[in-house]
Image (cartoon, rainbow, N blue to C red):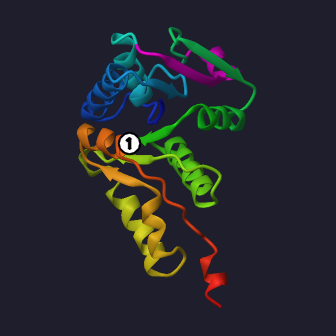
Amino acid sequence: MNICVFGASSEQIDKEYLKTAENLGKRIAQKGHGLVFGAGKYGVMGAAVRGAAAEKGKIIGVTPEFFIDMKVVFEDCTELIVTDTMRERKGIMEDKSDAFIICAGGIGTFEEFFEVLTLKQLRRHSKPIVIYNVKGYYNAMLEMLQNAIDRNFMSDDFNRLFTVADTEEQVFEQIENYSPYSYNKYKFLEEK
């Protein structure tokens, strides 16, 4: 299985996020899974890939050409795929992955999470999406999603499209015991 890890590229964050990401990368490799990531060598992404590399794991990095020019790419990937655009990069990461782990991150990570979540909602894939909620980082976002449900912008079963894990053990339990759920965004039309 190839597992995509989305996460921050910043080094200016609490070191606990980096430590847990590095351990996650190690565990992915120890379990025999491949790591798919945005090819960055810094932040949560960099920590996860260093962990996978330390265990001699399979590493698939996907980067736009301009990140190579900026010298922010982890160079020791098993496979490095270079794209023209960020959009192309995301599409390849999604296609090459069998599961997604959303680690702490900023706007880029939010965008990646919401894209794979939207695609799942629209039945373009049925892969597991696990929010790795280290130190409660995503609590406010989860409250925002619940607010949208409470106000009927999304249905109650929307929350079945992803899971939330507070520990690494929970991350792998949720991926390994995943059962696809077929969400019907337009079921309200059938109820009329």
Residue positioned 65% across, 83% down in the render? 190
Residue farthest to the right, as pictured: 84
How many marks overall?
1
Counting other residues with Cα less than 10 Å from the Cα at mark 1, is it few (<14), some (14-19), or many (20 or more)? some
Height in image: 88 above or below 79? below
Front residue of this view, candidates 100 and 70? 100
The region drawn magenta spans 57-71
Report the side of 162 relative to 123 (left or right): left
Q: Quadrant of residue 16?
A: top left
Image side of residue 131 versus residue 122, left or right: left
Between residue 160 and residue 37, name the one nearer to us: 160
Q: Let me know if residue 148 is in the magenta part.
A: no
Q: Position of residue 155 (x, y in %)?
A: 50, 75
Give the residue number, with chain letter if any, for mark 1.
175
Q: Secondary structure under badge 1?
A: helix
* x and y percentages locating residue 111 in the rendered image: 56, 48
**Which residue is at the front of the view, 56 or 107?**
56
Give the position of the C terminus as an image quadrant: bottom right
Residue 175: where, in percent of width, then height? 38, 42
Q: Position of residue 105 (x, y in %)?
A: 43, 41
Q: Quadrant of residue 94?
A: top right
Seen at 37% across and 23% down, the residue is 47
Mark 1: amino acid: Ile
Q: Please give left or right for residue 118 compared with residue 156 in the image.
A: right
In the displayed structure, would residue 89 be above or below residue 174? Answer: above
> Would you say residue 59 sits in the magenta stretch?
yes
Residue at image point 46% right, 47% down: 128
* For residue 1, above or below residue 137: above
Look at 47% across and 58% down and name the residue there: 161
